Amino acid sequence: MTLEEIKDIVYNATGRRVDKDTRQWHYAYARKMFCQLASTYTSHSLKDIGDSCGITHPSVLYALNTFDSTVMAVESQRDAYKECLSSIGVEDNGVNSMRNENRQLRRLIEDMKLTSRDKLDSDTERLFALYNALPDRLREDVMFKVETAYKINEKHKRDLNVIYTEA
């Protein structure tokens, strides 16, 4: 199933285009519905899903996280979602919902791993740039403080490990 097909399914069920640039609630709910369906029934990344409807990757995450408390809380939207599921050919029973939620959580974990790895690389590069910009006399002081903090942290880790293994 393609993202365009899911867009059409959501449009047929709601009468709203998910790529329309507006914050009106009925369009926002249609976008959340699209994000939920696209995340569950395709292998597209959250970035691809967001790009296809004009929102960012964090907005897709927000849509997925708030789907149950917003879209599923409004009867007309819940009915539209069930119509979308029916159009896709999925019966919304407990087992399917749990499988889909499991798949969605796995994707979310993978996206979070990639995001944190990229952030760590970016933060490390920035830290080295700041360190290299320091005058030589300050570098020694900074390095001494970093080494001291590291040693204290390692000691605390060892102490906690002893406490947990004794318990």
Image (cartoon, rainbow, N blue to C red):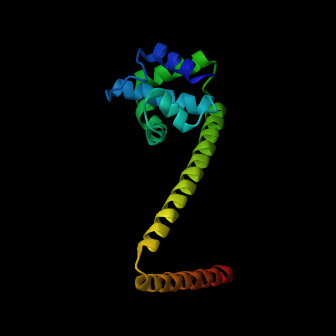
Q: Quadrant of the C terminus?
A: bottom right
Q: Is residue 115 above or below residue 164?
A: above
Task: Name the quadrant containing residue 2.
Answer: top right
> Measuring 47% from the left and 85% from the top, which residue is drawn there?
140
Q: Position of residue 66 (x, y in %)?
A: 44, 39
Q: Position of residue 156 (x, y in %)?
A: 56, 83
Q: Is residue 161 above or below residue 80?
A: below
In-front residue for pair 146/109:
146
> Measuring 43% from the left and 25% from the top, which residue is drawn there?
30
In-front residue for pair 43/162:
43
> Measuring 53% from the left and 83% from the top, which residue is drawn there?
147
Q: Position of residue 123 (x, y in %)?
A: 49, 62
> Measuring 43% from the left and 33% from the top, which residue is drawn there?
55
Q: Is residue 50 above or below residue 136?
A: above
In-front residue for pair 146/69:
146
Q: Position of residue 84 (x, y in %)?
A: 54, 19
Q: Is residue 121 above or below residue 78?
A: below
Q: Quadrant of the N terminus?
A: top right
Tell how many labels: 0
